[in-house]
């Protein structure tokens, strides 16, 4: 069974017992998550395909493994001949989710 879910403004192709990394959710580690925005559900071989308009009446359940931050990205700005230099860093908050079942 495969499904396409939408969370955090992005779409993910998921299967049971798969780990995905999404935008941060407000839950703590070990919490159960339910994804209601399911855009497509299909069998592994693609025989039974249900495409939503925009969503399918299915849910994807999973457990939150951990909240973490990605590696630091350095943002540099530079303008020639005016001595303008700026450096900033950014670390995005992420959530790792283990997909349990597709219903």
Image (cartoon, rainbow, N blue to C red):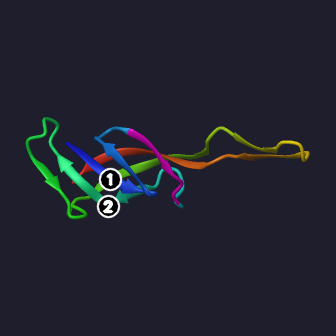
Report the residue that reaches farthest toward the front. Answer: 81
C-alpha gap between disc 2 and disc 1: 6 Å
Q: Residue furthest top?
A: 45
Q: Residue at x 20, y 64 (%)?
A: 53
The number of numbered discs placed on residues in the rendered structure image is 2
Image quadrant for the C terminus?
Answer: bottom left
Contact? badges 2 and 1 (CB < 8 Å): yes
Q: Check disc 2: other Cα within 10 Å, few if <14, some if 14-19, many if 20+.
A: some
Residue at 54% of width from left, 55% of height from top?
Answer: 28
Q: Which of 5 and 75 is in front in this view?
A: 75
Rendered-image quadrant of the N terminus = top left
- Pointer 2: what residue? 37
4 lies left or right of 28: left
The residue lying toward the viewer, choosing from 96 and 42, is 42
Magenta stretch: helix, strand or loop mostly: strand
- Describe residue 41's horizontal placement relative to residue 94 as left or right: left
Q: Is mark 2 on a helix, strand or loop?
A: loop
Q: Quadrant of residue 26?
A: bottom right
Q: Residue at x 54, y 54 (%)?
A: 24
Around disc 1, counting alpha carbons within 10 Å, would you say few (fewer than 14), some (14 to 19), or many (20 or more)?
many
Q: Does the magenta stretch include residue 22?
A: yes
Estimate the x, y position of residue 100 in percent, counting from the top left.
32, 46
Magenta region: 19-25
Q: Decide which of tag 2 and tag 1 comes sooner along the chain.
A: 1
Disc 1 designates what residue?
A: 5
Nearer the observer, 43 or 78:
78
Percent of width and height locating residue 92: 62, 48
The single residue placed furthest to the right in the displayed view is 83
The percent position of residue 32, horizontal first and vertical second, equals 41, 55
Q: In this view, does 74 lie above or below 23?
A: above
The kind of secondary structure element at disc 1 is strand
């Amino acid at each position: 069974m495969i499904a396409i879910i939408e969370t955090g403004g992005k779409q993910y192709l998921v299967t049971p017992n798969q780990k995905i990394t999404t935008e941060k959710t407000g839950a703590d580690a070990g919490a159960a998550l339910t994804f209601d925005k399911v855009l497509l559900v299909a069998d592994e071989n693609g025989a039974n395909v249900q495409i939503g308009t925009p969503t399918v009446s299915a849910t994807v359940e999973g457990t939150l493994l951990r909240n973490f931050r990605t590696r630091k990205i350095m943002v540099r700005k530079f303008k020639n001949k005016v001595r303008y230099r700026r450096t900033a860093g950014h670390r995005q908050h992420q959530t790792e989710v283990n997909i349990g079942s597709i219903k």
